[in-house]
Amino acid sequence: MSSSTASERSRGGRTSATRDALIRATAQVMLEEGYAAATSRRVAAKAGVKPALVHYYFPTMDDLFLAVLRDGAETNLARQRQALADDEPLHALWRLNSTHGAKLFMEFMALANHRKEIRSEIAAYAERFGDVEESAVTLAMRAHGVDMEAFPPVVMSMIVTSLARIVLLERGLGITRGHAEAEAFIKHYVERFELPSS
């Protein structure tokens, strides 16, 4: 085998169905059981492959976690772009932040407490997500003549995003206190400040 082929394999070539299956399996394990359960053996079992194949494609578990993070983040960035093209972008962004993709992101935030490389990757993606959401909120608030000094769009965006994720996280733990009221508040907020139809 040539060194370039070995190098490509160790980086996890993007064309392998097995590699993709391992990424999907890892995400599933993280969602269902938490990041600590995502061992090479558990991931291999979920993907239906031999454990040795995990390290064939991903020399370390950090390599695998980063691949899962990047795959999920790029998917969510694409969904975010679709949300902004929606007739009701604020509603769409709320729904996006209330999905399993957001739950997986929170699992990665917990993992990042123990892995520096994951932390820096999350920070880079969070900036990209935040910039786009802040832009959408800014446009909506400007269209409604909101005082953006009194209600900074970056803060309003953070409130909506954080609230969606907290509700999702707590619901997974069986906590529902205040959820109906919070969702009613956000529904009122997004309906009031939604971008006008063109």
Image (spheres, rainbow, N blue to C red):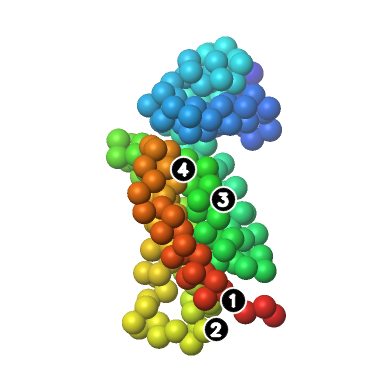
Three-letter amino acid code at the position of disc 3: Asn
Per the model, the C-alpha gap separating discs 4 and 3 is 12 Å
Amino acid type, residue under disc 2 in the picture: Ala
Label 2 Cα neighbours within 10 Å, binned few <14 / some 14-19 / many ≥20: few
Q: CA distance from mark 1 to mark 3?
A: 22 Å
Q: Name the residue: 55% across, 67% down.
A: 90
Which one is nearer the viewer's eye here, 135 or 58? Answer: 135
Disc 4 and disc 1 in contact, CB within 8 angstroms: no
**Which type of secondary structure does the marked residue at label 3 adopt?**
helix
Q: Nearer the N terminus, badge 4 or badge 1?
A: 4
Question: Where's the C terminus, which quadrant?
Answer: bottom right
Q: Distance from label 4 to label 2 (Cα)?
A: 31 Å
Give, as a three-letter code, the residue at label 4.
Answer: Lys
Indicate which label's residue lies in the foreground, 2 or 3. 2
Please name the amino acid that badge 1 sits on: Leu
Disc 1 target residue: 195
Q: Is residue 184 above or below residue 143?
A: above
- Please name the residue that numbered disc 3 is placed on: 76
Q: Where does the image place residue 133, in percent across and percent down from the top left?
A: 50, 65
- Tell me if label 2 and label 3 are in contact, CB under 8 Å: no
Indicate the secondary structure of the residue bearing disc 1: loop
Task: Find out whether the residues at labels 4 and 2 contact each other: C-beta distance under 8 Å.
Answer: no
Residue 115 shows up from this direction: yes
Q: Secondary structure at mark 2?
A: helix
Dot 2 or dot 3: first in sequence order is 3
The residue lying toward the viewer, choosing from 5 and 198, is 198
129 relative to 150 in the view: left or right: right
Q: Are marks 2 and 1 in contact (CB under 8 Å)?
A: yes
